């Protein structure tokens, strides 16, 4: 069976050529297994659930997946996903534009927003520096952050990258770039367990870490 972009299903992956046709259910299960945290058993369970679910419900899921990829883009200011030129947070006049909280991923921004007490703006890097994986500064949105920091309205940059080796390295790199601007540069306090990631922290843990942040 010819599948995505003319590739064919063979064993556990889509390949060019190959002569073993796969069932549609196998194909679905394999696509599901690409999702984080979904192993073969979960993929099989989800695939059979979708097979049994009402058609409208499954098509709505398919449409939601399509819409996310086709309609979401990066906010022109903070790089968070948005359907508009600027995201809702950047458009919100009640937010404090003098404080920028720098996070690795949109899901980290969501974690801060769930906490509900941070009133500043964000900057989403879309990753962290990882030299061993070939992820350099040009792959992140650091240029945009530096431009914002230079803009004049910013008084504080909170480096809220994950408390990991690479997160720390990324924070250090950014701090070096904006050090000469005379801003307050802070890093989240070590209320968070070393080696963990922000998205799994509970709201109180995150609130404590934000409250106890130190000058970096
Ligand atoms: Zn924004």
Image (cartoon, grey):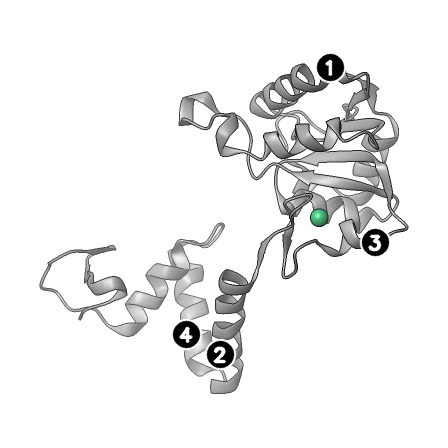
Q: Secondary structure at mark 3?
A: loop
Q: Which mark is residue 179?
A: 1
How far apart are the alpha carbons under marks 1 and 2?
A: 51 Å
Q: Secondary structure at mark 1?
A: helix
Would you say 3 lies left or right of 67 here? left
How far apart are the alpha carbons under marks 4 and 2?
A: 12 Å
- Viewer-nearest of labels 4 and 2? 2
Q: Which mark is residue 92?
A: 3
| Callout 4–callout 3 Cβ contact below 8 Å | no
50 versus 14 height, above or below: below
| Callout 3–callout 2 Cβ contact below 8 Å | no
Q: Pinpoint residue 27: horizontal percent, then vertical percent.
A: 30, 66
- Viewer-nearest of labels 4 and 3? 3
User: Of marks 1 and 2, which one's residue comes earlier in the chain?
Assistant: 2
User: Of marks 1 and 3, which one's residue comes earlier in the chain?
Assistant: 3
- Viewer-nearest of labels 4 and 1? 1
Q: Secondary structure at mark 2?
A: helix
| Callout 1–callout 2 Cβ contact below 8 Å | no
User: Of marks 4 and 2, which one's residue comes earlier in the chain?
Assistant: 4
How far apart are the alpha carbons under marks 3 and 2?
A: 35 Å
Q: Looking at the rendering, which quadrant does residue 48 occupy?
A: bottom left
Q: Could you classify mark 3 by the number of other residues whose Cα lies within 10 Å: few (under 14), some (14-19), or many (20 or more)?
A: few
Q: Which mark is residue 48?
A: 4
Q: Pinpoint residue 3: horizontal percent, then vertical percent.
A: 24, 67
How far apart are the alpha carbons under marks 1 and 3?
A: 28 Å
User: Of marks 4 and 3, which one's residue comes earlier in the chain?
Assistant: 4
Q: Could you classify mark 1 by the number of other residues whose Cα lies within 10 Å: few (under 14), some (14-19), or many (20 or more)?
A: few
For the question of whether residue 171 can be seen, the reply is yes
User: Of marks 3 and 2, which one's residue comes earlier in the chain?
Assistant: 2
Q: Could you classify mark 4 by the number of other residues whose Cα lies within 10 Å: few (under 14), some (14-19), or many (20 or more)?
A: some
Please give the residue where the numbered disc 2 appears in the rendered image.
58
């Amino acid at each position: 069976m010819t599948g995505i972009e003319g590739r064919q299903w063979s064993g556990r992956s889509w390949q060019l050529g190959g002569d073993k046709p796969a069932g549609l259910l196998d194909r679905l299960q394999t696509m599901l297994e690409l999702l984080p945290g979904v192993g073969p058993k979960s993929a099989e369970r989800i695939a059979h659930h979708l097979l049994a679910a009402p058609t409208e419900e499954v098509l709505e899921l398919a449409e939601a997946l399509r819409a996310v990829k086709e309609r979401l883009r990066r906010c022109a200011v903070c790089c968070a996903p948005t359907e508009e030129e600027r995201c809702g947070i950047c458009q919100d006049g009640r937010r404090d534009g003098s404080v920028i909280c720098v996070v690795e991923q949109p899901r980290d921004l969501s974690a801060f927003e769930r906490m509900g007490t941070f009133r500043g703006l964000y900057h989403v890097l879309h990753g962290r520096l990882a030299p061993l994986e070939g992820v350099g500064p040009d792959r992140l949105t650091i240029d945009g952050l530096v431009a914002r920091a230079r803009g004049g309205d910013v008084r504080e940059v909170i480096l809220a990258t994950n408390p990991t080796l690479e997160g720390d390295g990324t924070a250090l790199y950014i701090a070096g770039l904006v050090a000469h601007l005379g801003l307050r540069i802070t890093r989240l306090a070590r209320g968070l367990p070393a080696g963990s990631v922000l998205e799994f922290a509970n709201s109180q843990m995150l609130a404590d870490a934000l409250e106890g942040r130190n000058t970096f």
